[in-house]
Amino acid sequence: MNMLMVRTQFNVMPATPADVARMREIQLKHFIKLDSPENLNPRMKNGFFVTEVKDDKFIARITDTKQGLVLVARNNGQISGYALAYDLDCIRREEPFLFDTLEINEAYRKMMSGKKILYIDQIAKDPQAGGGVGSALLDGLEGIAGWHGYSVAAGLVMERRLLNMASARLMCKFDYERIGAQTLEPDAWGVFAKRLEKA
């Protein structure tokens, strides 16, 4: 599948290595440094915000879909936003310590057992792009995830020191459930998940 079309003015499709420079531009507009208190002023943050991902990690996910999925949203040929998602097993191998601090609803933990899970790490848009970019990207991720065998999508939304309101609203809009939390003092995140397969 060369292109995934969604029902908006945006064309959502798999990213290519040539897209990484533009993706980094967008990322830097939403970038936060958790170790810099001056960078965590809620009044300075609007829309989505993300932590840094190096170019080599973007390219690794773009060129090897077994590691994850990377999509871009284009409008009139211009990249308006991107989505970065990982295969959860890939995260377990690379950063196993992250799972030590997860508290997941037991019923949902059992439901996810043995399932192929897509971890949605970042959705970000150009602030000048207008509305609908995040929705187009999440719709695109969910659509293409099935082609790659994923039956659950999950993500973290920062809730303490900063509330990532744009991400929280997007998860609610797409019927994600808050199934748990992760705390790494002084920060905390909500864990959201959604079944992509039919019951």
Image (cartoon, rainbow, N blue to C red):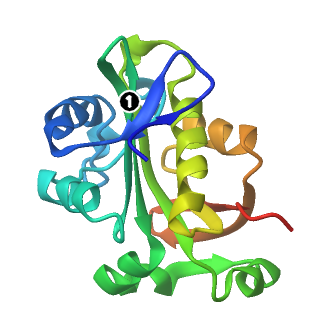
Question: Measuring 60% from the left and 60% from the top, which residue is drawn there?
Answer: 146
- Asked which secondary structure carries label 1, the reply is strand
Q: Which sits in the foreground, 75 or 109?
A: 75
Quadrant placement of the C terminus: bottom right
Q: Residue at x 48, y 82 (%)?
A: 99
The picture quadrant where one finds residue 186 is bottom left
Residue positioned 41% across, 48% down in the render: 122
Q: Is residue 196 above or below residue 24?
A: below
- Kindly identify the amino acid type of the residue bearing the numbered disc 1: Gly
Q: Is residue 36 above or below residue 120?
A: above
The spot of residue 124 in percent (x, y) is: 40, 35
Image coords of residue 66 (percent x, y): 36, 71
Label 1 CA crowd tier, 10 Å (few <14, some 14–19, many 20+): many
| Vertical comparison of 91 with 81: above or below | below
| Relative to 62, 171 lies left or right | right
| Residue 76 or residue 32, whichever sits in front | 76
User: Does residue 41 appear anywhere in the picture?
Assistant: no
